[in-house]
């Protein structure tokens, strides 16, 4: 997904004079190889390992009418610079695009400094943000272009893991598999789709997909949900989007389950596959959690 992001951002720089990219050392190499830094030296900036400055520069560019893209590793972009996100973008009332790599634990060997399953929860705590969690590189391209056409604040969370194929309209809620009347609905977010489908197997559940769980209207959610049980599987902290989605479906009693990275201090390294197994986020773990909750 990072390669797709760099390629698309470089194309946007060539197409539009109001696009800028602000970096903090991360991905400087890829943008050099894409030719963006040489071609657009006044619109591609590397501020060094100064993430707070990166966001303040981004806010200043937005105040001047630019559509800036700030990019770094997930915890560096969202956690280190959270106050600047809140003030220099949110309080100033300007729009920008934040694009992260690293997801929850794409680099487990680097430890907790590079792990950020809480990032989307932090962004969701601020008003008027749109969050995209693409499940495939082609979706990342599409959603970055969509974000460039908007004027609001957009966070795009890229992941090293992706589904086997892209969904045509990733920001919508798309039914992937229908169940019987009254079947539980499982919403797979971003790169969780392939694992959710493998977990569902022969279970009587419907499966839907979205890269933007909080962008769905109550009507769309209710129309997709045939029964009263809703399970949302996210690559972020468990239950990240569940509260708001539950609030949109308050017309009658329903049951909700959020599956994701459990809260807790995880002092683990190993591989991405090790983390998925430990957190119950591989197909076996997801199936176990769904089966146990439905029983």
Image (cartoon, rainbow, N blue to C red):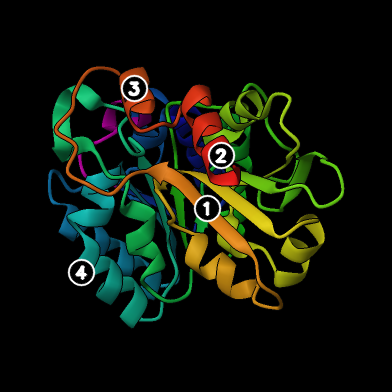
| Label 1: which secondary element | strand
Q: Residue furthest front?
A: 295
Dot 3 crowding, Cα within 10 Å, few <14, some 14–19, many 20+: some
Q: Residue 27 versus residue 235: which sits nearer the camera?
A: 235
Residue at numbered disc 2: 290
Residue at numbered disc 3: 272
Dots 2, 3 in contact, CB < 8 A: no
Q: Residue at x 42, y 43 (%)?
A: 260
- Image coords of residue 213 (percent x, y): 58, 56
Rounded to the nearest angstrom, the CA distance separating label 2 from label 4 is 37 Å
Q: Residue 182 versus residue 28: which sits nearer the camera?
A: 182
- Image coords of residue 128 (percent x, y): 47, 74
Would residue 163 appear left or right of 13 to someone viewing this image? right
Would residue 38 appear left or right of 8 to someone viewing this image? left
Badge nearest the viewer, 1 or 4: 1
Q: Which residues are magenta?
A: 23-31
Dot 2 crowding, Cα within 10 Å, few <14, some 14–19, many 20+: many
């Amino acid at each position: 997904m990072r390669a797709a992001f760099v390629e698309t951002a470089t194309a946007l720089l060539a197409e539009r004079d109001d696009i800028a990219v602000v970096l903090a050392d991360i991905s400087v190499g890829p943008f050099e190889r894409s030719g963006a830094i040489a071609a657009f030296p006044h619109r591609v900036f590397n501020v060094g390992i100064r993430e707070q400055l990166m966001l303040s520069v981004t806010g200043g560019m937005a105040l001047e009418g630019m559509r800036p893209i700030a990019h770094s590793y997930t915890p560096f972009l969202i956690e280190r610079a959270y106050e600047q996100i809140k003030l220099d973008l949110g309080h100033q009332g300007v729009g920008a695009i934040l694009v992260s790599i690293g997801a929850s634990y794409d680099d487990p060997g680097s430890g907790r400094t590079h792990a950020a399953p809480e990032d989307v929860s932090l962004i969701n705590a601020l008003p008027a943000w749109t969050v995209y969690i693409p499940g495939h590189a082609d979706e990342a391209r599409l959603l970055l272009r969509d974000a460039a056409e908007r004027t609001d604040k957009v966070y795009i969370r890229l992941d090293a893991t992706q589904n086997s194929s892209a969904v045509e309209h990733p920001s919508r809620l798309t039914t992937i598999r229908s169940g019987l009347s009254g079947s539980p609905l499982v919403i797979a977010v971003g790169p969780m789709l392939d694992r959710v489908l493998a977990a569902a197997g022969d279970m009587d559940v419907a499966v839907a997909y979205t890269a933007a769980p909080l962008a769905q209207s109550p009507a769309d959610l209710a129309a997709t949900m045939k029964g009263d049980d809703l399970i949302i599987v996210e690559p972020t902290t468990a239950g990240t989007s569940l509260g708001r989605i539950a609030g949109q479906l308050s017309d009658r009693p329903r049951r909700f389950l959020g599956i994701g990275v459990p809260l807790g201090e995880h002092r683990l390294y190993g591989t991405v596959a090790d983390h998925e197994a430990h957190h119950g986020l591989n197909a076996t773990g997801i199936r176990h959690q769904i089966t146990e909750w439905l029983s």
